[in-house]
Image (tube, rainbow, N blue to C red):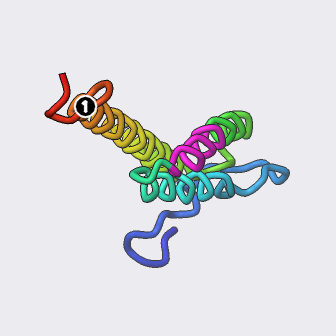
Amino acid sequence: MTTAPGQVSVAQQGLRHPLDPDPARATKARAVFALGLLGLLTGLFIGGVVPATVALQLARQARREAYASGGFLTGGTWLRRGERLAWAGLVLVAVTVVAAVVIGVVRLAGSPFGHDYPSNMD
């Protein structure tokens, strides 16, 4: 029995046990997304390594809790997006560190080595 086109009938819905909890979004999922976004935005300034690392650790905990809940914790999409942003932030940190090292080595190689004597000394 449906009341409007497109609605799911009552007969098609699966019966739940009355003591089963309602599915709820995991609060850690949004925190992972926010920390991953912060890690991405601050990745070029090397400060993104901290929120990105925390986001990845928190995502690991959230996945473990979601698995243990038996499907009653949702938010897997937010977790995946947050993890991708965190990894992108860590890649930006790595690129920044490698670029700084290369620039430092090139500048060191271009500077004179040893003591620079005046041209009138032997």
Q: Quadrant of residue 118?
A: top left
Vertical placement of residue 99 versus 44, above or below: above
Local packing at callout 1 (Cα closer than 10 Å; few below 14, some 14-19, many 20+) is few
Magenta residues span: 47-59
In the rendered image, residue 81, in percent from the top left (x then y), is placed at 45, 50
Most foreground residue, 111 or 101: 111
Count of numbered badges drawn on the protein = 1
In the rendered image, residue 83, in percent from the top left (x then y), is placed at 49, 43
Say which residue appears at 79% left-offset and 49% top-offset: 20
Left or right: 51 with respect to 81? right
State the residue position of label 1: 117
Residue sticking out furthest to the left: 119
Q: Tell me if residue 56 is in the magenta stretch.
A: yes
- Dot 1 falls on a residue whose secondary structure is loop
Most foreground residue, 27 or 5: 27
Vertical placement of residue 15 versus 91, above or below: below
Most foreground residue, 14 or 11: 14
Vertical placement of residue 52 versus 33, above or below: above
In the rendered image, residue 5, in percent from the top left (x then y), is placed at 38, 74
Amino acid bearing label 1 = Tyr
Q: Main secondary structure of the magenta part?
A: helix
In the rendered image, residue 104, in percent from the top left (x then y), is placed at 33, 36
Left or right: 104 with respect to 24? left
Say which residue appears at 53% left-offset and 55% top-offset: 33
Say which residue appears at 68% left-offset and 48% top-offset: 72
Residue sticking out furthest to the bottom: 4
